Image (cartoon, helix red, strand yellow):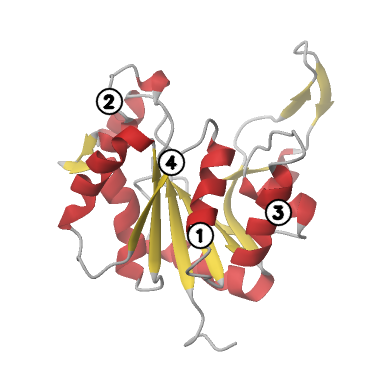
Amino acid sequence: MGKQTLKAAVIITAAGSSQRMETGTKKEFLTLNNQPVLLLSLKPFVNSNLFSNYVIVLPELEIKTGQNILSSLDDKLKFIYASGGATRQESVYNGLLALESEAPDIVLIHDGARPWISKYIIKEVHRESILKGAAIPVVASVNAMKFIDSSGKIITNLKREFTVAAQTPQGFNYTKILNSHTKAQKDNSTYIDDAEIYSKYAGDVSTVPGDTANRKITYLSDIHIQGE
């Protein structure tokens, strides 16, 4: 399939409760440099001109707020709003289901609380997903990594040069990641991310260099670090 005919979509996940922010406001709705985090997380995908559909996954009662935040974007863009589930895994699955009628070839799944994503990483994940079927951005581990058991006891001391931290967007062949998530819904397991689900049910996941600036906002202090 040529690049001219390939169809790509984006899923932005923003269905969490943001309890750790302790602000009473969803972190994706907070402002950074006078713009909502949700808008900043989406803009680089829009500006890349690589995608034909944009799925925004939000709590059902927050969809209207999300629509208002994104109303400043080109009204010719094709937005689909989906209700989130009880977990991120369920929310991604709902987003994938919302794309069934569009049938994209690949889909990139991105955290709505990662507003510092660059067009370069988006393009790299998009390219590698086309070539390999699945790709995620990663950065080198800077801490000593340990594997522990349920009691907190260290079981294995992992070699730092062989460990990385995964970021988003994570890109996949759409049909394969949808089928993988469908199976994951039935196996009563909880997965750390979409790459793990794909690895279990569909195949290998490639990696591309990520960026330490591509942080995920978890606490209110994350918005203010590095002078932002």
The three-letter code of the residue at mark 4 reads Arg
The one of 166 and 159 positioned closer to us in this rendering? 166
Residue picked out by circle 3: 180
Q: CA distance from mark 3 to mark 4?
A: 27 Å
Q: Nearer the viewer, mark 1 or mark 4?
A: 1
Q: CA distance from mark 3 to mark 1?
A: 15 Å
Res. 169 in view:
no
Q: Residues within 10 Å of mark 4 (few under 14, many from 20)?
A: some
Secondary structure beneath label 1: strand
Secondary structure beneath label 2: loop
The three-letter code of the residue at mark 1 reads Leu
How far from the left and from the top, in percent, is residue 216?
43, 38
Q: Quadrant of residue 90?
A: top right
The one of 60 and 140 positioned closer to us in this rendering? 60
Q: CA distance from mark 3 to mark 2?
A: 33 Å
Of the residues under marks 3 and 4, which one precedes in the sequence?
3
The three-letter code of the residue at mark 2 reads Thr
Q: CA distance from mark 2 to mark 4?
A: 19 Å
How far from the left and from the top, in percent, is residue 62?
30, 36
The one of 131 and 103 positioned closer to us in this rendering? 103
Q: CA distance from mark 1 to mark 4?
A: 17 Å
How far from the left and from the top, in percent, is residue 81?
36, 51
Res. 67 in view:
yes
Q: Residues within 10 Å of mark 2 (few under 14, many from 20)?
A: few
Residue picked out by circle 1: 108
Residue picked out by circle 4: 215
Q: Are marks 3 and 4 in contact (CB under 8 Å)?
A: no
Q: Left or right of 95: which side holds 59?
A: left
